[in-house]
Image (cartoon, rainbow, N blue to C red):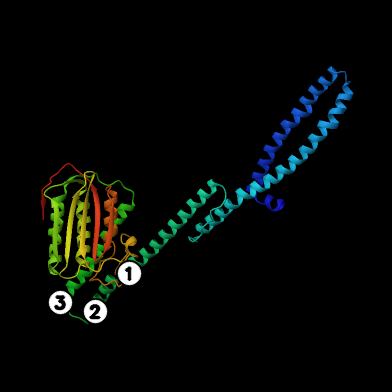
């Protein structure tokens, strides 16, 4: 067992350190007993009439023999303690090291057991959390690549098909064909713009400083812009907010957040349904909610709806959803401005909400 332990560098160093400390302690004891105590013993014995030779012999026969036996026992116990301590400390650290090498080679399922001293257990917990986070990031990265490829492939394939048909005179160039080509190109432009927004948030560049805006006016404006989409599907929209309420925000980004949430509501609210937009003044911040009736979001999907390219509607039906980036942009823009974002869905109602820091404008008069 000692030979196996010495083959491990860390365990060997721990064992050697323990032996050095034990040896130093034993050396101090040895000097104290064999030098100082012997001198005092001989001096006392001579004062009581014993010769120096007799005092020395008596000391060596009693104290010296007992000390040598105790020294031998101490060495054995120190060696045993060093082996146990080295194994206790080095084994969990070696397991963490092996797991770290697995993660470095792409095995994000690697985990380490919680064993050893409390400090090593804390290190194991931190490592396991890191590995779980990397595993989740890898899953999101793979899904991002797959979904991005799909979102690019669909309009490009359509454009390629139309252009080849026009080139080969299979179809005639008429306004309807050009409208379809423009729609596919516009879809690519929107996707590119959305990816640019996400990339700006990931770049680490400092955003523009927020200013005080009239949140009530911003919400009314966003609803007015989205109203044609609601009217086409006979969706009623109710607004509950004060006449004026201030918030600290970046106007363009606030408009983008509201537009994305309202667009999301128009897509997933059934025909003839209803959407409610609510603004609540909570002194420290302002809470904005967009609630719609409909099928709702399954509980398994709720934690993922703000992920990039994630779709609750897995069929990728273009009538039921966009590229799956809108809510990711909402989360990024809201959090970069110091707010929070969330979603709740139960009993046929789905509520998306976000907060913005409160501003200076205040009015308690409600308007619908």
Question: Which mark identifies residue 353?
Answer: none
Q: Is mark 2 on a helix, strand or loop?
A: helix
Residue 98 showing in the rendered view: yes
First in sequence: mark 1 vs mark 2:
1
Q: Distance between the residues labelled 1 and 2?
A: 22 Å
Residue in the picture at 87% in, 28% down: 57
Q: Would you say residue 256 is visible in this rendering? A: no
Q: Earlier in the sequence, mark 2 or mark 3?
A: 2
Q: Which residue is located at x 68 percent, y 42 percent?
A: 16
Of marks 1 and 2, the one in the foreground: 1
Position of residue 343 measured from the top left corner of the image (x, y, whole percent) = 28, 59
Question: Which residue in the protein does label 1 denote?
Answer: 150
Q: Name the residue under label 3.
A: 174
Looking at marks 1 and 3 on the same chain, the residue that comes earlier in the sequence is marked by 1
Quadrant for the C terminus in the image? bottom left
Q: Where is residue 77 in the image (x, y as percent from the top left)?
A: 72, 43
Residue in the picture at 19% in, 60% down: 262
Residue 61 picture quarter: top right
The answer to whether 33 appears left or right of 300 in the picture is right
Circle 3 crowding by C-alpha within 10 Å: few under 14, some 14–19, many from 20: few
- Residue contact at pointers 1 and 3, CB within 8 angstroms: no
Q: Is mark 3 on a helix, strand or loop?
A: loop
Looking at the image, residue 247 sits to the left or right of residue 328; the answer is left
> In the rendered picture of this protein, how many numbered marks are placed on residues?
3
Q: Nearer the viewer, residue 37 or 155?
A: 37
Residue 165: mark: 2
């Amino acid at each position: 067992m000692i030979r196996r332990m010495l083959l491990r560098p860390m365990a060997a160093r721990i064992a050697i350190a323990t032996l050095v400390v034990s040896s130093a302690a034993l050396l101090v004891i040895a000097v104290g007993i064999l030098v100082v105590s012997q001198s005092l013993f001989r001096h006392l014995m001579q004062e009581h009439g014993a010769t120096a030779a007799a005092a020395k012999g008596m000391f060596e026969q009693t104290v010296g023999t007992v000390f040598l036996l105790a020294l031998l026992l101490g060495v054995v116990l120190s060696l045993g303690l060093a082996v146990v301590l080295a194994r206790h400390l080095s084994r969990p650290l070696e397991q963490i090291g092996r797991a770290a090498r697995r993660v470095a080679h792409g095995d994000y399922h690697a985990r380490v057991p919680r064993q050893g001293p409390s400090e090593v257990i804390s290190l194991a917990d931190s490592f396991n959390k890191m590995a779980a986070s990397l595993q989740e990031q890898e899953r999101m990265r793979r899904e991002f690549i797959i979904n991005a490829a799909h979102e690019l492939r669909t309009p490009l394939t359509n454009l390629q098909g139309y252009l080849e048909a026009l080139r080969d005179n299979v179809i005639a160039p008429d306004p309807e064909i050009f409208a379809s080509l423009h729609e596919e190109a516009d879809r690519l432009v929107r996707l590119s713009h959305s990816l640019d927004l996400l990339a700006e948030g990931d770049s680490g560049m400092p955003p523009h400083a927020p200013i005080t805006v009239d949140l009530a006016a911003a919400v009314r404006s966003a609803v007015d812009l989205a109203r044609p989409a609601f009217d086409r599907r006979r969706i009623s929209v109710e607004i509950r907010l004060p006449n004026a309420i201030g918030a600290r925000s970046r106007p363009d980004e606030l408009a983008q957040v509201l537009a994305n949430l309202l667009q999301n509501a128009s897509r997933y609210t059934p025909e003839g349904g209803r959407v409610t937009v609510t603004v609540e003044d909570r002194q420290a911040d302002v809470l904005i909610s967009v609630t719609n009736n409909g099928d709702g979001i399954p509980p398994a999907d709720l934690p993922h709806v703000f992920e990039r390219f994630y779709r609750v509607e897995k069929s990728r039906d273009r009538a039921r959803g966009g590229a799956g980036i809108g809510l990711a942009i909402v989360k990024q823009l809201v959090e970069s401005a110091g707010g929070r974002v969330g979603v709740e869905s139960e009993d046929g109602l789905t509520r998306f909400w976000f907060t913005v820091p409160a501003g200076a404008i205040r009015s308690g008069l409600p308007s619908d």
